Amino acid sequence: MQHPAVRDRPLQDGTREDGRVMLRTPSAKVASVGVTRTALAIQDELGWLFREQPIEDYGIDAHAEVVDGERVRGRLLALQIKSGTSWFERPGPGGWWFRPDQAHVQYWMNHSLPVVVVLYHPETKHCYWQLVNRRTLVETSTGGWKLLVPESQVLDAHARAVLREAAEGDPYVLRIRELQLAKPWIELLASGTRLVIDIEEWVNKTSGRGSISLGIDHEDGKDPEPVASWGVFLGLASYADVVPRLFGWADVALHAETYEEADARGDDEMFDWADYVPPQEEEEEEEEREPHSLRPYANGAGEVDFWRLELTLNEVGRAFLVVDRFATDSGRQLTVVREP
């Protein structure tokens, strides 16, 4: 007899070895559409960045990052997205009541980012939103919680000002938030895992359009295992200057193997980057310009520069792990003390 894990394994044609067909449930389809619609609203209506939460996170589906003009602000919101007509079955004054469980409320209130609940209605094709905070949460007579999601709060351009204000914070708090969000990656580096950054920069776009992906280098000659990815619009800023600031908990350097192979190939798409200066700086009038130590390893058709950089945990990252471990242990001790 086959082991159940083998017997139920899906085959390439979408069936399982027991002959049953793998089907996509209606609820899964609606949930996927809800995330897509929310992403479109964030990107097209607000003009901000949207990225699904790449690492499994309890009660958070995605992050939205504020963009002012072409400047990425480093201000984030955490999104909990719910899709389907069932979430609109509890009418409230001017909207609908959303009833989260106690565990989710506690998690959201202690989250390092402001949390926004988004409800997607598949019939109206609209996303409705509400911030989660002490003002919007209402305790019920049974000791539970409910949150009014107003019908007037559609996730469109009208929501930009309020959500931007919610994402703002003290610079110190924002810095701590960034470290908390990066904690899984910091822990990977601390464990000896090699993390690399792959960048595709569209050099002929004044928006500074590009994509950044974080991956694990297993040192097996294969492409890195993807961990997270997101699109960026850096305007006229240099990737060589901005990327190290995005990963302030690590030192950033060239991925040695990639650049050695690029130099060895020496084909038409590989250049001598010894005097590399970002394209957006070429027209600047400067008496002296020093080449960046961080540079692309290849260019595609004169349109896209390709980078691969490696992260090494720095003092900031190591210190954060020590403080975080201390805070976590202290919290556990306080929890024990409170128990009867």
Image (spheres, grey):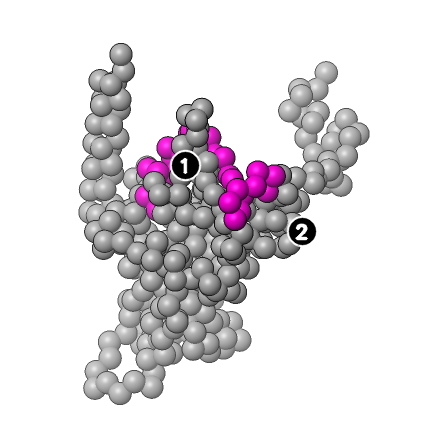
Q: What is the x, y in percent for residue 206?
A: 43, 77
Give the distance between the C-alpha atoms of the residues marked 2 and 1, in whole angstroms: 28 Å
Coordinates of residue 29 in the picture (x, y in percent):
66, 44
Residue 186 locus on image (x, y percent): 32, 43
**238 and 251: which is toward the camera:** 238
* Residue 259 appears in the figure: no
Q: Residues within 10 Å of mark 2 (few under 14, many from 20)?
A: few
Amino acid type at circle 2 is Glu
Q: Residue furthest front?
A: 93
Split into 4 quadrants, where in the image is the N terminus?
top right
Q: For this view, does 101 lie left or right of residue 273?
A: right
Image point (33%, 62%), residue name: 73
Q: Nearer the viewer, residue 169 or 73?
A: 169
Disc nearest the viewer among 2 and 1: 1
Q: Is residue 79 above or below residue 322?
A: below
Disc 1 target residue: 138
Q: Is residue 260 above or below residue 25?
A: below
Magenta span of residues: 87-113
* Residue at mark 2: 123
